[in-house]
Image (cartoon, rainbow, N blue to C red):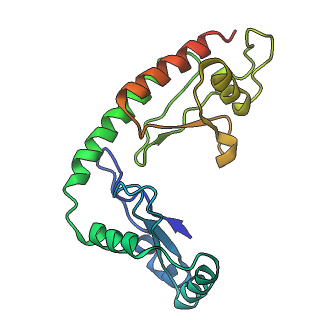
Amino acid sequence: MTDDMYEHLVYNGFTFATFAEVAPDLQDRTLTINGVSKAYCMTGWRIGYATGPQPLIKAMATLQSQSTSSPNSIAQHAAVAALNGPLDFMAENLKAFDARRQLVVDALNAVDGIDCPNPDGAFYVFPSVDGMIGRKRPDGKVIENDSDFVTWLLEDGGVAAVQGVAFGLEPHFRISYATSTAALEDACARIKASSDKLD
């Protein structure tokens, strides 16, 4: 199963390809899922779609029809219009995301103990906090892992982040840059201020 939700949100000349394109011999065993919430800016419309082997799609449709009925007709028509409509708005959105991505990457890399690689897609960064492990909070508690670090960010700086262990990526954390530039500048300044308090 592959999640292609961010197929249009890629940077630096990165070329997106579905798993079925890369390994066509596995197409009969591949389930590809996607939706309109991210690239089409339709968060909350709750429209997703999938392609895969017919027996699997049929079973999914049966399960869905018994648990949620179906998406409302307005959302269905809006999704069809998005998927069949022009994509010219995406270039402007991508440019804004790219600027925010660079802002966050640069700001986090300026913090001693954080190493933030530049992602090729989506709108999240996954910085490493390996350099924070073993440091002490002002109250004497030791930062032993990424969960301790994100707890400190929330308690001290009011910044909500998700620990990397939730994604199988310890000792990292995840921050979304799908918000305003002002909010990101403020959050990054808070992360730096809280990080600077660790000994």
Q: Quadrant of the N terminus?
A: bottom right
Q: Which residue sits at x=34%, y=40%?
A: 97
Residue 122 left/right relative to 65? left
Residue 65 vs residue 86, the one in the foreground? 65
Residue 151 left/right relative to 38? right
Task: Find residue 194 and report its horizontal and vertical position in percent.
Answer: 60, 15
Task: Find residue 168 and report its horizontal and vertical position in percent.
Answer: 68, 48
Q: Which residue sits at x=70%, y=42%?
A: 165
Residue 101 left/right relative to 134? left
Which of the 4 image quadrants contains residue 83? bottom left
Q: Which residue sits at x=64%, y=77%?
A: 67
Task: Find residue 32 and report its horizontal and vertical position in percent.
Answer: 49, 72
Residue 137 vs residue 105, the one in the foreground? 137
Q: Which residue sits at x=63%, y=24%?
A: 153
Residue 142 visible in the shown view = yes
In the rendered image, the vertical position of residue 75 relative to residue 10, given as above or below: below
Residue 87 vs residue 144, the one in the foreground? 87
Which of the 4 image quadrants contains residue 139? top right
Which of the 4 image quadrants contains residue 155? top right
Residue 78 left/right relative to 124? left
Q: Quadrant of the C terminus?
A: top right
Q: How many marks?
A: 0
Task: Find residue 111 and report its horizontal and vertical position in percent.
Answer: 52, 17
Residue 111 visible in the shown view = no
In the rendered image, the vertical position of residue 8 relative to residue 189, given as above or below: below
